[in-house]
Amino acid sequence: MKKSLTFLILLITLKLATSDPCADIPTCAECVAETYCGWCSTNIIFENGQRGTNCAFQGKDATPFFCNGIYQTETCIPDEYKCNNQTFQCEKVGYGEGDEIDVCLSTCFPPVYVCNEQTSECEEAKPGELDATSLDVCEASCGIEPPEEFVCDPDTLECRKANEGESGSTTQEACEEACGKTSNSTPAAIIGNWRGLEVDIGYKEGEWRMEISEEGQITINNPDGKIFAEGQILTMQSELWIETRDGIFRGLWAVNQLPTVTALTWALGGEGLTVPPNFDIAMEDSAPGTVFTFFKCLDESNCEFSQTLLKRYMKELKVKELLAQTGDQCTVHETCEECIGDESASCGWCSVNVLYKNGTVEGTQCAGHNSDGSKEPFICNGAYSTESCTIPDTKTSDNTATADDTATSDNTATADDTATADPDDNKKYTCNPTTLRCEEDSNGNYGDNATCVAQCVSVPITPADLLGSWRGLQINQNYITGEWLVDITEDNVTIVRPDGDKVIGHLEMIGQYLTIFPEGGSIKGNIQTLWQVTYGPVTKFLGWAWGEPNGAAPESFQSAMTASNNAEFVFVSCLTGKPERSCLFRGI
């Protein structure tokens, strides 16, 4: 009997399944699209009480069913929901009693309240009303007088009551804990050897030096080598101070990261005076203080600003490089006496540095013939002697470029340059700014040759960010000390070295490279460069890496710091739009 009953139930189940071909359709849209199918918003109930799915069959031999919800055979009406004002949850309701789920969710929130300052009572807030919060939070503060707020007076370094809305206000206790309280804990970002420039309106030209130890001992030397300030670094809230034997310099400071150096902008008030209100006022001529931009190496393996180590390194490096380039054994002599006293009796002393290889390699003042008679031809553009060190201090220069010095370029792409982009081609290309040709490069900037060719042209346009007067320092390992000057206009560029040598030319963009085309001066050959502009609080910074004359651009800012015959600089210029009373570089 049990087996017969089981078989009967199975038979009925199979009959129901075979008589309802719509049962497996999962969505309303798919269900109503099928012939003889309809969608119930709830699971259907068959006449024997068995529960079905939402999609039911109404064709021939269909099993009768009951839909206790919304039944649809043409369009799908979405379920409707209504907010439960006790739980603030959206709950499903009957058709016509609520809204679609998105509408319900956008309005189903607990009420928020604001404090009525007149009655000191919390009232339900209007939509979008400011300062609205929960009832508990509102009642905890409504009608209660807020505590008085205080600020640290920058002149007296004492706490005073804050004006309404004054920035930096806090409780009296918090103010008194910090106001005027200094720390001699030196910020890690400022420890090290720095080279820099004065940038305020009354700036002193030339290179400044600064050394800050881990203990916070600081010495700043002006371009004449005299001590500007010496003492202990202190910090007070956001200020950076120097405590000297005679008084305190209080200052504002900011740090920027450039490609190979850290830039520190430091606005110091006068000794014993208050801190400048802001960087702009500190720059003005009427402000009794000084504003600096200092630079520190990011990576000491390719950058060295320590004076003692630098001088020794520079001498060794220059001699090594010159010997490799010229083979002139006379370059090892640092003084005239040593030079003309050479045992080989083949060295002479020039009143200025000599030039080798048609003026492309600068040597030292000692040059001549080697002991075996070999030599690298050189030019002394001053007075040259092999007998006496009494040489007139004269120097002549010929800034006229010869035909051999003039570089030409053909900006016309040939048929060989043109390529059709292949979607399956994963090759990358880079523009060679020297040849104006595109080359395969796994680290290239262009995804196909056609795009590269289109942009690998010389464009006589100077980026707007570069226009103006710039002051800067050379920072690669074999740098020349002192201040460099650059004036850039839409048509020309003028570069002045620390020794006064002037180079005149123009700039062009070739791909992502900025190319210098010299037309007069000591630079012989076009120079491909990398450049990057960063913005500080009172100046903008230009990181500028030069390749070898008539050579390739530097591979990167980092490589230019050590590569032979490369050079790297950091320049500063007034921010665009700043009034001349707060920033003005005199130019060339």
Image: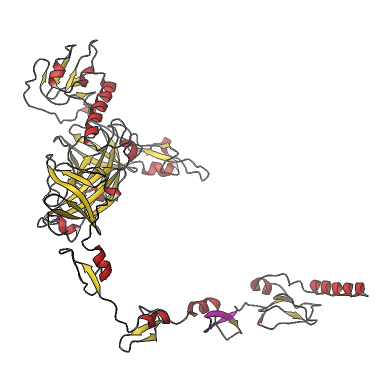
Give the main secondary structure, helix, strand or loop, of the magenta stretch.
loop
Q: Is residue 365 above or below residue 540?
A: above
| Residue at figure coordinates x 18%, y 61% from the top left | 277
Point out the residue furthest to the bottom here: 119
Q: Is residue 549 left or right of residue 113?
A: left
On the image, the x and y values in percent for residue 197 come to 18, 45
In this rendering, the answer to whether 40 lies above or below 495 is: below
Q: Confirm whether residue 462 shows in the render.
A: no
- Which residue occupies the extreme right position in the image? 1
Residue 156, image quadrant: bottom left
Task: Give the answer, above or below, for where 54 lies relative to 203.
Answer: below
User: Would you say residue 72 sits in the magenta stretch?
Assistant: yes
Q: How is the image coloured?
A: secondary structure
Residue 51 appears in the rendering: yes
Quarter of the rendering occupied by the C terminus: top left
Residue 100 point in image, percent of width and height:
55, 79
Closer-to-camera residue (171/511): 171
At horizontal 27% and vertical 42% (from top left) the residue drawn is: 544
Q: Quadrant of the N terminus?
A: bottom right
Which residue reaches farthest top? 372
Rendering quarter of residue 525: top left
Quarter holding residue 195: top left
Q: Is 106 left or right of 515, judged from the image as shown?
A: right
Q: Can residue 533 be found in the magenta stretch? A: no
Residue 98: give x, y in percent of width and height. 56, 84
Q: How many marks?
A: 0
Residue at coordinates 25% horizontally, 30% vertically from top-left? 313
Query: Residue 523's x, y, as percent?
Result: 21, 32
The residue range painted magenta reads 67-91
